[in-house]
Image: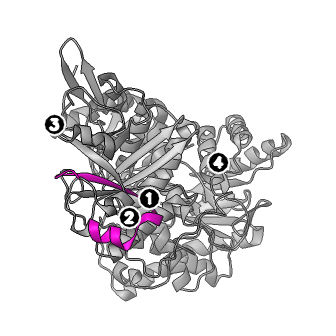
Amino acid sequence: MDLKTAVSQTKLYCNSLTKYSRRKTREVSIGGIPLGGDNPVRIQSMTTVDTMDTKGSVEQVIRMVDAGCEYVRITAPSIKEAQNLEEIKKELRKRGYTVPLIADIHFTPNAAELAARIVEKVRVNPGNYADKKRFEEIEYTDASYEAELSRIRDKFTPLVKICKEYGTAMRIGTNHGSLSDRIMSRYGDTPLGMVESALEFLRICEDLNYHDIVLSMKASNPQVMIQAYRLLVQKLDEEGFQPYPLHLGVTEAGDGEDGRIKSSVGIGTLLEDGLGDTIRVSLTEEPEAEVPVCIELADRYKDRIPHDPIPDISHYPINPFEYSRRQTREVLNIGGHQVPRVVANLGSRDKITPASLFGLGYQYSVSLDKWNITDMACDYVFAGDKDVDFPLPGTLGIIYLHSTWLRHRETERSYPFIRAQEYVNGMEQSPVLNFISATLREISSELIEKLKHDTTAVLVINTSNRHGYAEERRIFVELIERNCNVPVIIGRHYKDIPGDRLQLYAATDIGGLFIDGLGDGVFLSAENSGGDKLINETTFNILQATRTRISKTEYISCPSCGRTLFDLQETTAKIRSRTFHLKGIKIGIMGCIVNGPGEMADADYGYVGSGPGRITLYRGKEVVKRNVPTAQAVDELIGIIQGDGNWVELEK
């Protein structure tokens, strides 16, 4: 079955596109803490200490649980680590901590079979549990492929039987970057390949009448991750599987605000549609730092109902399993094939001066009388009713409320902001660009007909609905069904929330729409929710995470775990400090071979731990240098980038 066939099915991947409703899943008991069913979204993370360090592991687990972690995953790469899980568990119980433990298994079925007798859950990766990855393309006949499935069944069945006997739960966790050569050869590097990888193992479990299963479809690219989870749910329904609970996560998200925003785009988009029963945010930080981010994301859906009603969608014109940007006409530098544009809000300022633009990527030097324009310089500024009476930098445009614009209509790069009903009624417009503001309630037939034929119009949408993501998506459906190709700026306004929460919320609300190819720009504004710089950079980081506008270097960095062969946080910081200016370059930083090179599948360059004190360097999936001493590895990586002609010197 190819992806096009899968897409042609009419079954929707979620309960509703307009009314918030969680997907009802099978309840799976994990050490007395049930997952799925009517239970809340559960929070989990993974230790970074060497599993053989019993005391260190126990102390870290306690910190994680005290931070709010409900399940804790610990790597067990070999028999000895699997055995030591018993000592860790004993010590935790002795200290009054009953948190369920999950053994993380790659490559080693014998370790999984031992761990399943000790801990409450095991995680297996179908890409490497029974296969070795060599990046080979293999031709299979139906008979030879069935023979491979029989081999996998023989290798996997003992673990399933042990889990049944001991009451141990299992996560079948597909990772985009570690799909087996067999899956890659038949399905390619696709969401469908990810889904089939898990379903091969799930079919074995169901044949053995074992159902204490959780499924995951992780990827470092949120777009791939979202598409895979959606397709998984559809396939489960199509083939009559039970509605197994989902573990959500964006793997190798990185650190800091980048990691938080990328994770929120992936996890939040799925939570918006009621998918997900447990979440883990994979940051290159201490695991207890992941937990508050998970809690923020999950807690948002505790009071999502009731929300303002949104008209149903009878036909969904967007393919949720493949990326295709909505086709729009080009108005100046908005829409068409232009990158999404960023609009910043200075309308609440008492006065707008050159200094007001500093946090928006424009830095004015008085002594030199010139502007320095950064890679994160916004494209437009909404000035509201404030006059801008100084020369503008670069190509920056100013948007005024209509009454104020009338005073500036002869000024270069000044454009009006017009309310929907006023626009329909008719008023003086700019001959080149007009921003028309509307909510879903204001999207009338008259408005759409006028927008269809107005080659100067850009629609700015907004919402105050608690379920605003779905409401704004509903606007796009209306435009597509009416064949209206007006460019759309996605507007969202937040008030009185901390800046770190703003990043998570905006990444969810805006990022998910761009993942589906919807949107030609962003107008993010916030009151008492972080300064101009944070708000502006959040917008660019959301576009970067959705890969719709690249403004800086991207780092695909795994979270540390007991397998990591170097100080991941320190190394990531060192590489970032020397390469952050390489706009558009993707660098994978992986602690061990489990997470590389597969997990950094679309990185341009890779830095992977290959042994104690040794690093292997990659160009794409190709090994360039093996066993480089750690002390020299960053310099060697930069040398490879320079040799490829992709290095630029940082301006002083």
Element assignment for label 3: helix
Circle 3 packing at 10 Å, graded few (<14), some (14-19), many (20+), is few
Q: Determine which of the numbered discs, if any, sits on residue 295 in the image.
A: 4
> In the rendered structure, which amino acid carries the disc numbered 3?
Gly
> In the rendered structure, which amino acid carries the disc numbered 2?
Asp
The residues bearing labels 3 and 2 have C-alpha atoms spaced at a distance of 37 Å
Q: Quadrant of the N terminus?
A: bottom left
Element assignment for label 4: helix
Sequence-wise, the earlier of marks 1 and 3 is 1
Where residue 116 sits, quadrant-wise, is: bottom right
Q: Pick the residue in front: 482 or 649.
A: 482
- Give the x, y percent position of residue 571: 42, 31
Circle 4 packing at 10 Å, graded few (<14), some (14-19), many (20+), is many
**Mark 2 near mark 4, Cβ–Cβ under 8 Å?**
no
Q: Quadrant of the C terminus?
A: top left
Where residue 452 sits, quadrant-wise, is: bottom left
The residue beneath circle 3 is 643
> In the rendered structure, which amino acid carries the disc numbered 4?
Ile
Q: Determine which of the numbered discs, if any, sits on residue 512 in the image.
A: 1
The residues bearing labels 1 and 3 have C-alpha atoms spaced at a distance of 37 Å
Q: How many marks?
A: 4
Question: What residue span does the magenta drawing correspond to?
Answer: 429-451
Sequence-wise, the earlier of marks 2 and 4 is 4
15 vs 579, left or right, is right
Q: Does the magenta-highlighted stretch encompass residue 448?
A: yes
Which residue is found at the position 42% from the left and 77% from the top?
316
| Tag in front: 3 or 2 | 2
The residue beneath circle 2 is 516
Sequence-wise, the earlier of marks 4 and 1 is 4
The residues bearing labels 2 and 1 have C-alpha atoms spaced at a distance of 7 Å
Sequence-wise, the earlier of marks 3 and 2 is 2
* Residue 170 visible in image: yes
